[in-house]
Image (spheres, helix red, strand yellow):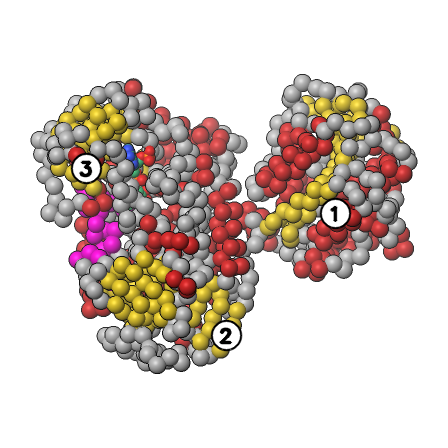
């Protein structure tokens, strides 16, 4: 395609239809994202038209002109980084620029790249329809124009549609009414007036100190107190400027590959284990820095661990109490109903101190809700107030409001609003099935509002532009995600959110601020870095999860780009970085020493009531055990547990965090018994020991604080293999009574030729070579097919109910599934839990792989049912 500078005619209008599009791309919105997209597409030779509802560029920064409006990401970072020349030509005056300065910047960018000539202002896009026959979009605007285009991009922003005022009586008020998000361009003079501000999110908190400077009386109506820290606005911070000046490219690259889009030193300090001095020091540094990501990153675990979060939250409350003179007002301002960060914290300039002014008053709507707005003011349950002006700082229909607000109809006339009635569904937050050639920049399912928007916008624009260039180069004219890819992405977005505290809050991130809006977590919280890697991978794998077609042919590499649980992926990547030697390259004693050292670094697992060490008699000497007793009064059911480690590694304490977790979740005594290991004691020594342990524990239940005959066997990996073996033997030899068996990612067969063995041969901790090493140490080839080594080959009828847990990325997955199916076929009640996105080891990583907790909870529920179910003995 040739470069058609300034032309409004698409260069590629040939997809086998008689009429081509009027332009290649229609873009909605001329804010940060629309402007950069126009620049990039034009430079690549695409014809583009941008429609903008406002009378000028700026998007968010055109509309939000309320006093005090500033960015909350330092302008060293909240700025375009795509062109070093542009960066040389523009100098920000402050750490956090004001709205007028940001608007001037966007106007400067517009003029510098001569963007205006392709933007139609005062034109709102009202509808867009896909024609599947022609492969074109028809885009309708409020000016009556309809434009056909090949690609339709909504660059409409995440916080651009104000939430409708949902307060009874609002239209009745006879005084002046203002919305922070639609502030009059000529400004507002509130001097000498009685003013109400409703809402204490970022907009309220930024504007209240300035409104207080003018108003004769200011009354702030607060429903939810929000966390706010001082912005400490000043000239741009010297450290960031210094890093930028020293190596601009390195600084920008660090931002692109950071979690939030701003270069930051990530900490591995945990709130719970840090000393009081360290806690205080880290908090004070973040408070002084006055940066969002600093206060959100005081501890590595504050976004996932309530106790760690509370440490930072309480330190903020302490600061607040020290600023606000009136203790009752201070207490009302203290956020207590949500975890720090689960609603966006604010950066303020004198917000809390404003409440010390004699003419400023806080009304706590939790105590005294608004009953109605009257002609003269606001009535609460306790009092009537009269005002000259009401300012609504009540927020936005975030992330999806602007997208579903336009009548976008995809294939078959289905609208985006219809498709997303139960919540947004996207692939990469950019595209959605049924809507070919449609892109939503910074859409739901992308990091967007959780990140530095400037960085996220550039990444999205680059991805879309590069994709359109790729399509053109290969003669493709259509791109659409598959349902498989989209469902997989939605699942990944939800998995990422589920391990955080975010879903607990009534936030706009959750759609909770708009009545009737679906409650899901809208943005992607897996990090700008991980997100960028996923997008890059999709392209590198030749558009994985997309269907492409055009004169160049058709292609579809269907698949899911992120299948591992996000925290499992993090652990695997951290392990890969350590370049650890493979266990099978070591001797068994070396491997044992290595495992013991690693175990010393993990979290210990939850507290239990009591831990008791003991020994029991085995066929070749004493067997050590460790018993974990619940804190609740006994007696308790008993879980006899056998550890994993391929019959070569481990002992009665090697799975301690898992045993503690089982103890707490099931409220049962867990007895973890050691057994002899190979190669010193080969098969069937371990199974003989496990059998002896079962008999002894069965006979000594009362002594151990257990309920007689209320016993299940549990084991992980090789330990689960032993459980299966001794359960079969207990059936054959008439006891002891076993109520059930928990087989966690069990080794059930020695064939090592299953699909999962090949698929997951490498990269997921338990590798195929390691499994072979275990079998070779444990058992002679001739013996491996005996049921004492391979329980899958044993007789399975008449066994107690089983809970079989398999992990998706485990070489042993298929033999676990085979065992569950064979048990079921033999008439044994079986609950099979398939742990999606987990590995052989990840479910045991208590306190490290947080997503494993959900699976262990499921296990505990089922185990609890087995233990407490009355059975005929
Ligand atoms: O909106 P919000 P915002 N009666 O939704 C209250 C970005 N931003 O415009 O929490 C009484 O946060 C509502 O109460 P509650 C930033 O990402 C950035 O302030 O629902 N009160 C809440 O207190 C931010 O997060 C900057 O209980 C009602 C407030 O109104 C996002 O935009 C500046 C109510 C709304 O807070 C949105 O911020 C500004 C009712 N009926 C915005 N309805 C920067 O600093 C709502 N509220 C860059």
The answer to whether residue 688 is magenta is no
Residue at 80% x, 57% y: name it: 751
Q: Earlier in the sequence, mark 2 or mark 3?
A: 3
Q: Which mark is residue 820?
A: 1
Give the crowd class for mark 2: few <14, some 14-19, many >=20 residues within 10 Å.
few
Q: Are marks 3 and 1 in contact (CB under 8 Å)?
A: no
Q: How far across and down, in percent of the image, does residue 194 sit?
A: 13, 29
- Depth check: 110 or 46 in front? 46
What range is drawn magenta here? 51-74
Question: Magenta part mainly helix, strand or loop?
Answer: loop
Q: Quick one: SS at disc 2?
A: strand
Is 318 situated above or below 76? above
Residue at 86% x, 52% y: name it: 784
Asked whether mark 1 and ligand 1 are closer than 8 Å, the reply comes as no
Name which quarter of the figure residue 119 lies in: bottom left
Q: Quick one: SS at disc 3?
A: helix
Q: Quick one: SS at disc 1?
A: helix
Residue at which label 3 appears: 171
From the viewer's perspective, is the residue at label 2 or at label 3 nearer? 3
Give the crowd class for mark 1: few <14, some 14-19, many >=20 residues within 10 Å.
many
Residue at which label 2 appears: 554
* Image quarter for ligand 1: top left
Q: How far across and down, in percent of the image, does residue 839 sit?
A: 64, 49
- Depth check: 682 or 476 in front? 476
Q: Which mark is residue 297?
A: none
Residue at 26% x, 34% y: name it: 167
Residue 164 visible, this orientation: yes
């Amino acid at each position: 395609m040739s470069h058609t500078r300034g032309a409004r005619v698409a260069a590629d209008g040939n997809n086998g239809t008689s009429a081509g599009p009027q332009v290649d791309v229609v873009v909605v919105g001329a804010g940060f994202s629309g402007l950069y997209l126009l620049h990039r597409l034009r430079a690549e030779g695409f014809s583009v038209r941008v429609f903008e509802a406002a009378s000028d560029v700026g998007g968010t920064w055109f509309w939000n002109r309320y006093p005090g409006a500033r960015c909350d990401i330092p302008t060293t970072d909240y700025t375009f980084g795509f062109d070093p020349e542009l960066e040389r030509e523009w100098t920000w005056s402050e750490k956090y620029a004001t709205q007028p300065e940001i608007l001037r910047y966007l106007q400067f960018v517009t003029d510098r790249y001569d963007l205006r000539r392709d933007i139609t202002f005062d034109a709102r896009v009202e509808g867009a329809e896909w024609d599947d026959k022609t492969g074109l979009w028809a885009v309708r605007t409020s000016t009556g124009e309809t434009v056909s285009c090949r690609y339709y991009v909504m660059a409409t922003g995440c916080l651009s549609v104000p939430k409708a005022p949902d307060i009874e009586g609002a239209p009745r008020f006879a005084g002046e009414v203002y919305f922070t998000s639609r502030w009059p361009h000529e400004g507002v003079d509130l001097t000498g007036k009685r003013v109400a501000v409703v809402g204490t999110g970022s907009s309220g908190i930024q504007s209240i100190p300035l409104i207080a400077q003018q108003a004769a009386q200011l009354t702030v109506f607060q429903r939810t107190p929000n966390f706010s820290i001082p912005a400490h606005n000043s000239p741009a911070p010297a450290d960031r400027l210094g890093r930028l000046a020293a190596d601009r490219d390195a600084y920008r690259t660090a931002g692109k590959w950071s979690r939030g889009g701003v270069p930051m030193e990530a900490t591995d300090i945990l709130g719970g284990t840090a000393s009081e001095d360290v806690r205080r020091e880290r908090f004070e540094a973040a408070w002084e820095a006055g940066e969002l990501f600093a206060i959100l990153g005081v501890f590595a675990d504050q976004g996932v661990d309530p106790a760690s979060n509370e440490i930072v939250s309480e330190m903020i409350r302490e600061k607040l109490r020290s600023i606000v003179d009136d203790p009752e007002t201070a207490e009302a301002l203290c956020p207590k109903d949500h975890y720090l960060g689960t609603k966006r914290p604010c950066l303020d300039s004198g917000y809390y101190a404003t409440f010390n002014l004699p003419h400023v008053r806080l009304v706590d709507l939790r105590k005294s809700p608004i009953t109605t707005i009257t002609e003269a003011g606001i009535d609460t349950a306790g009092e009537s107030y009269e005002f000259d002006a009401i300012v609504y700082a009540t927020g936005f229909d975030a992330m999806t409001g602007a997208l579903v607000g336009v009548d976008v109809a995809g294939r078959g006339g289905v609208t985006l609003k219809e498709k997303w009635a139960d919540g947004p569904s996207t692939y990469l937050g950019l595209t959605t099935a049924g809507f070919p050639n449609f892109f939503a920049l910074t859409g739901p399912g992308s990091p967007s509002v959780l990140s530095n928007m400037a960085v996220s916008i550039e990444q999205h624009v680059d991805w879309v532009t590069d994709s359109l260039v790729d399509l053109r180069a290969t003669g493709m004219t259509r791109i659409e995600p598959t349902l498989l890819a989209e469902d997989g992405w939605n699942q990944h977005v939800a998995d990422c959110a589920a391990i955080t505290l975010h879903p607990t809050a009534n936030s706009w991130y959750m759609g909770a601020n708009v009545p009737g809006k679906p409650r899901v977590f809208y943005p992607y919280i897996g990090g700008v870095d991980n997100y960028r890697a996923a997008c890059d991978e999709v392209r590198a794998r030749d558009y994985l999860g997309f269907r492409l077609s055009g004169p160049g042919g058709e292609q579809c590499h269907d698949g899911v780009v992120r299948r591992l649980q996000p925290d499992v992926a993090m652990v695997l990547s951290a392990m890969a970085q350590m370049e650890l030697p493979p266990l099978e390259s070591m001797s068994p004693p070396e491997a044992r020493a290595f495992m013991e050292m690693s175990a010393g670094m993990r979290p210990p697992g939850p507290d239990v009531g009591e831990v008791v060490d003991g020994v029991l008699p085995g066929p070749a000497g004493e067997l050590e055990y460790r018993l974990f007793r619940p804190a609740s009064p006994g007696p308790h059911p008993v879980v006899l547990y056998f550890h994993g480690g391929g019959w070569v590694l481990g002992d009665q304490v090697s799975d301690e965090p898992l045993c503690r977790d089982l103890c707490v979740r099931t409220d049962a005594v867990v007895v973890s018994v050691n057994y002899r290991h190979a190669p010193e004691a080969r098969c069937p020594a371990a199974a003989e020991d496990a059998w002896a342990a079962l008999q002894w524990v069965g006979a000594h239940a009362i002594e151990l604080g257990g309920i007689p005959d209320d016993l299940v066997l549990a084991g992980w990996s090789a330990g689960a293999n032993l459980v299966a073996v001794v359960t079969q033997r207990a059936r054959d030899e008439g006891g002891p009574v076993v109520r059930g068996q928990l087989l966690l990612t069990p080794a059930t067969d020695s064939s090592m030729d299953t699909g999962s063995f090949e698929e997951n041969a490498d990269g997921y901790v338990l590798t195929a070579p390691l499994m072979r090493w275990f079998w070779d140490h444990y058992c002679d080839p001739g013996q491996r097919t005996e049921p004492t080594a391979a329980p899958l080959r044993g007789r399975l009828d008449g066994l107690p109910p089983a809970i079989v847990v398999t992990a998706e990325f485990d070489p042993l997955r298929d033999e676990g599934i085979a065992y569950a199916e064979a048990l079921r076929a033999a008439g044994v009640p079986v609950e099979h839990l398939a742990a999606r996105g987990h590995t052989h080891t990840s479910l045991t990583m208590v306190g490290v792989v947080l997503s494993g907790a959900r699976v262990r909870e499921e296990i505990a529920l089922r185990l609890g049912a087995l233990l407490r179910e009355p059975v005929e003995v």
